[in-house]
Amino acid sequence: MKYTKNILGTMLLTAVVTASCVDDKPLAFEVEKPASIAGMEYLNDYDVLKNYVSSSANPDFKLGIALAASDYIAGGQVTQLANSNFVEMTAGNAMKYASCVNDAGEMNFDAVENFVTAAKAGGLTIYGHTLAWHSQQRPKYLNKLIAPIPLPIDPNAKNSFIEYNTNGAGENIWDKQATYMLPVALEQGVNYTFKVDIKASEEFEGLEFWPIWSASPNKDQWGGSKDVQYLGAKGAIGTDWATYEWNFTTQFTLDKLQIVFGKFGGKVYFDNLVLVKDGADDNLIDNGDFAEETTNGWGNNWNGPSFQIVSEGNDNAGFCLKMTNNEKKNNNWDSQVWYQFDKPLTEGNSYTFTAKVKATDSYNCTIFMQSSTGGAQGYPGGFNIGTEWTDVSFTFTPEHNQVDKFTFNFGDFVGTIYVDNVIFSDGTSDMYVSNFENQSIEGWISWNGYQALSAEGEGYSSNQTSIELTPQEKKEVLTAAMNNWIEGMMKATDGYVTTWDVVNEAISGGGDDGEGFYTLQSASNASADDAKNNFYWQDYLGNEDYVRIVVAAARKYYAENGGTAPLKLFINDYNLESDWDDNKKVRSLVHWIKKWEADNVTKIDGIGTQMHVSCYANEATQKSKEEHVVKMFEILAESGKLVKISELDMGYVDENGNNVKTENMTEAQHKAMAEYYKFIVKKYFEIIPAAQQYGITQWCITDAPSDSGWRGGEPVGLWDSNYSRKHTYAGFADGLAGK
């Protein structure tokens, strides 16, 4: 019998000959062939997989394999198996967003282009995986696109920082030091960036940054640590704020920052300190902007420059009421903002309004006294508003006993009026006091236009450093980013990839969309880690527009970049065969596809069911799994869409509910898996109409290594780790053949 690599790999059969010490004649005997070898020999009789596709299948049926693009490009055993057994490939990761886009938003499609070139040479088509997904994105870059827009800082705004007074120059640069003890020590051998704003009472040179390991056992004769990094000076320190930056790799564990300036006799000021590890965003310095006016963590050296928190600017630039009129109207009363008192004011009594006000242009603001019930109205006057914060005071006396509204009129003014530190007084006590620091605008009402800083963040005050983008602005920014990504991918594939997972794993598998179906994936229903590490486009583009935007971009940029064959777009998802929810997820997916296509523009061509399944030793469990595979295929057939088994692989679960590792699998368990493969593939062809049969893709070509991030150590392949056929190969082939 000929033993081939296809079954067992390379084997050496050794004839054993024993010599007799009596007659010196050889005693020959035969070694019986192991049952394990004999039981695998039938696999030699199988042809390559693609030759088993049923003649009754869709003539365009694609038998596919998923693999790493780099493995296929390498041209080794994986390439040979792919070319001989399959007609289509799916790249595991190479065509995903995070593989092509870095944290700065820069795109690189070299790997994709090389993969396309290799596929053409091998005569295989490519199934694109995937254009849109919430996982494997670049949250750092995408969140930066929709981050609040920085605003000019009001020069009058209060700013706190730390001051070090040297009280006279020393002889050496180390004689005067500002120190900060880090809450968490820096790691040895890691890259960090330190930024700080510095100014001085007069210009000087000779300021350096010396981070130190103060807890080091390596002390010198003075008791100080020898484990110091001397990072050098950054030129002259001026009398105006300037930013200084040090990039360094830690030579030791470092737990304390030292900024040395011993030869300077004056005051040095520090603000906005940021220390970050490369690739991270967390500032390792607490209260680096001194918004909390505390010196916690700060210190000095033995020559003791004194230090304290100081401030510049004023307290008048906090949150404030913001009234904006974008279009000049015929009368000043055509735009109004009023304060609604709790009860009507007393007729004839004297009341006082005081506040700080400013505007984008000078304006004489008229005040009305009104009644919410109508009828009562007075015109007591107004006050001038300039472009700088000014104190105003206005006294008024109600002429009616129904007056309960104090009204600003500014319809003939184009611009913004800011109001802060408001006090209404009746002469004996204050009826209303607000500096809007709690972001409350309770009692304030507008007619025909105003904006205010509220708990929801509408508007901004003169010292606010940024303004949030509106939901519509975020949608527009991210739509442009999505279009840019898809255009880049379509250029890289140059019309060769005609079928895509246009959106991957959109359905959450939980919640209720209001119609009895699952909601879409969202940061709101994800775990804390998933919400942080993923980017949920649909949270910004909208549940319905998300898919519509991606589909439209795919069709547009495919056509513009060499695409001539019909483009087929799939929605791909997992757990569609699940029995624990009676196939609710696949029903939900079909429901959402109908919603996405309800605009009569968007067209979804097909549905991909991943089918990362397991074969169960428990008969009842296995029976339930098989029944729901059938139900899934029936639902997919009824959808009228193309159907693809997009990521088929299989593990084994024993009677105790444990996943069995490859090394512990029995031959009976392998054969049970082969039967389940045959069942799945056969049912696909039996239930899915030929016209809807797009194809089947096996997700794992070989069993997973123990250190694999995907089903590590499990028997998920049709070949073993030595590229020998397994029983599952036969089951898969028999299913394709309809046996």
Image: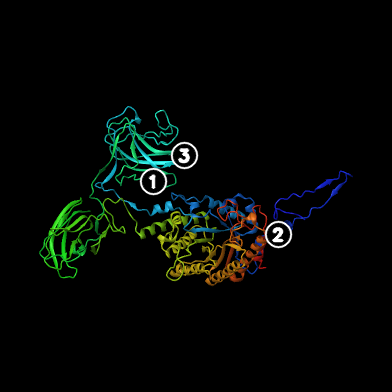
**Residue under circle 3?**
188
Q: What is the secondary structure assignment of the residue under circle 1?
A: loop
Q: Residue at x 77, y 48 (%)?
A: 14
| Residue 487 in the figure: left or right of residue 303 | right
CB under 8 Å between callouts 2 and 1? no
Disc number for residue 682: none
Question: Image quarter for residue 498?
Answer: bottom right
CB under 8 Å between callouts 3 and 1? no
| Residue 698 in the figure: left or right of residue 318 | right
Q: What is the secondary structure assignment of the residue under circle 2?
A: helix
CB under 8 Å between callouts 3 and 2? no
Which amino acid, mark 3?
Gln
Colour convention: rainbow
| Residue 192 in the figure: left or right of residue 125 | left
Percent from the top left, x then y, of residue 231? 40, 34
Whichever of labels 2 and 1 marks the residue nearer the N terminus, that label is 2
Q: Nearer the viewer, mark 3 or mark 2?
A: 3
**Residue under circle 2?**
43
Mark 1, other Cα within 10 Å: few <14 / some 14–19 / many ≥20? some
Residue 500 shows in this picture: yes
Q: Residue at x 16, y 61 (%)?
A: 367
